[in-house]
Amino acid sequence: MNERVLVVSDDPQTRKLLKGSLGYQGYRVAVLRQSNAAVKASETRPGLLIMDLAQTGEEVGVFLKRIQESCGAPALLLLENGHAERLFREADASRVRVMLKPYLLEELLEEVEAILSSAKGDSKLMMYSDLVLDTGARTVTRGSKSLDLTAREYELLDYMMRRQGEELTRSEILEQVWGREFKGHTNVLEVYIRYLRLKLESRGGERLIHNVRGVGYVLRDET
């Protein structure tokens, strides 16, 4: 077992308890306070988010959506009440599970194992040229080399792999990978395309991500 779990909580006792208990089970555990989770979650690249949320309200659903878009992981929410449908309709409900507090630690550990096992069951290999993306393990290799991608780089490559050979507009990539709020004139896509190219083309790899003038980008082997 080597899965990474990210715990988001403003309660130091909860962070300490979950880090110790999950670590003892063999998980790699990172902890964040809610105030800086949206910024740092993508750096952690977790397989699962555990979020202990004290407040309730629809703004929490928006926050959760931002976190999921940032790191691409399913979420286990620890809540004081059972209004999940109302509170989290902004989030991807198919990738969210809820436990009501108080909960038994044994039940939480069983839920964590079930979520991660389910994610592994959805594993699929996508291949293009000498590039291989494992959707279950969220790993990428090119030839014999494993590539260390951030969560956002992975999501961008995942989307382009699913649409390989298609000319993708800048706006559709932004909407699918970052969400609708990034539809403006931001250069975030260009920045991440550059990051991806640097990693994909290290050690002399041929270029796979190409500019399409007046359109956007395409994943295509032009060798």
Image: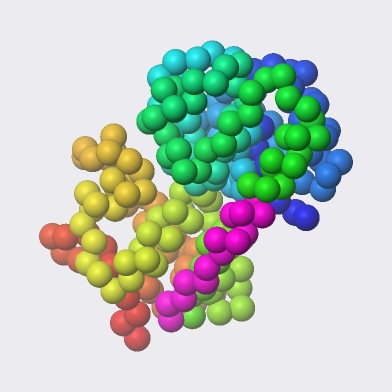
For the point 40% across and 19% down, the residue is 58
Which residue sits at x=32%, y=41%? 179
Give x and y (percent) for residue 87: 44, 22
| Relative depth, front residue between 35 and 99 | 99
At 59% from the left edge and 54% from the top edge, which residue is drawn? 119
Give the farthest residue toward the left: 214
Image quadrant where one finds the C terminus: bottom left
Q: What segment is highlighted magenta in the picture? A: 116-129
| Residue 107 coordinates in the image, percent (x, y) | 75, 35
Quadrant of image for the N terminus: bottom right
Please check the rendered image and state whether residue 152 is part of the magenta-colored stretch, yes or no: no
Relative height, residue 101 to residue 43 (above, below): above
Where residue 54 appears, as percent x and y from the top left, is 59, 15
Visible residue check, residue 195: no
Is residue 48 rendered to the left or right of residue 29? left
- Who is closer to the viewer here, 48 or 100? 100
**Farthest bottom residue in view:** 223
Determine whether 70 is above or below 119 in the image: above
Q: What residue appears at the point 62 percent right and 59 percent down from the top-left corner? A: 120
Instruction: Place residue 156 in its image quadrant.
Output: bottom left
Query: Going by the image, does 214 lie left or right of 207?
Result: left
Q: Position of residue 16 (x, y in %)?
A: 79, 25
